[in-house]
Image: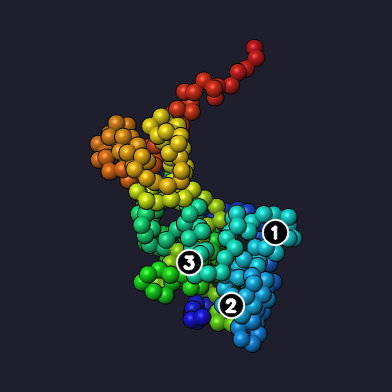
Amino acid sequence: MPVVTGVAEAADEVVIDQGPVPEYVTQLLKVAEGEIGYEEGGNNYSKYGEWAGDPNAAWCAEFVCWCVDQVDQQQGTELLNVVYPKYSGQNTGKEWFIKRGRFVFRRGLAPDWGHQWVIDADHELEKNEYIPYPGDLMFFSYNEAGDTEHVALVEYCTRNSMGEVFVHVIEGNNPSSVQRNSYPLDNSQILGFGLPEDRVDTTIRFGNEGDKVLQLQKKLNRIGILDERHITGVCGSNTRAALMDFQQNWMQDKTATGIADRETQQALELEVMQVEFDDPANWMVTEE
């Protein structure tokens, strides 16, 4: 695989505090740290590739997936294929996260979807604004098509005196071992991040499919403008029509585009909350 070059940690870098880390992330980083120094054998052999079914495969993804599986075995968790994908092929991991609404592009713009934003934020993400959390997966691309060819596990992030952010990772197969590395957040080879938790929302338009589309359809159904039979996880003509209805009749000064942008999704969320509040079935009965 191509060698991805990082940078050494500078003396003036300070770790960015992003709050408490889930226990499974702590355990995952502990497993990954314990593998630092592992060297592949001849013909690209690795125990991670062997575990995944191809002992001679390029093994950056296999290393991450192996570490997740180790946490599941040691802690009794069920992370693999639920919180993190089990994958080997190019783009498979990225697409897995996209389908679940948990992939954020470094540029803040998802191809074929649209702008992204942190949940409940009042603006769309700008380029290099999202700072990855420990436990995120960082995907690299070396071509204009955005194909992913390398992945690393985020350990933590730092900021230097110039305000520059660096992502510190543990990665496999770069070029032939497990090692720590560090990359500027604005590195042009960083495509984006796969998130183990739901932190971002993305513009939804005709043809998109996945968990975020399903959530959107359920909300449209809850306020009464999309039939339950159209809750499919695919944004088709009925979902687009319901969105246009909502934009035209429920929002002020909003052009009816049928595209669920940030403003539309946040307005819909407020309407759903109001419906839930007004529903007598949700009222608590108290004894005097």
Q: Secondary structure at mark 3?
A: loop
Q: Are marks 1 and 3 in contact (CB under 8 Å)?
A: no
Q: Toward the viewer: 209 or 98?
A: 209
Q: Toward the viewer: 93 or 165?
A: 93
Amino acid type for the residue under numbered disc 3: Asn
Would you identify the image quadrant in which residue 231 lies? top left
Q: Name, please, the residue furthest toward the bottom.
A: 42
- Residue 250: % across, % down: 32, 32
Counting other residues with Cα less than 10 Å from the Cα at mark 3, is it few (<14), some (14-19), or many (20 or more)? some
Amino acid type for the residue under numbered disc 2: Ala
Residue that label 1 marks: 72
Task: Look at the image and tell me whether residue 287 can be seen.
Answer: yes
The tag earlier along the polypeptide, 2 or 1, is 2
Amino acid type for the residue under numbered disc 1: Asp
Which residue is painted at 27% across and 40% down in the image? 256
Which residue is painted at 38% across and 62% down in the image? 107
Residue that label 2 marks: 57
Relative to 257, say whether 77 is above or below. below
Which residue is painted at 37% across and 45% down in the image? 236
Residue 48 — which label?
none
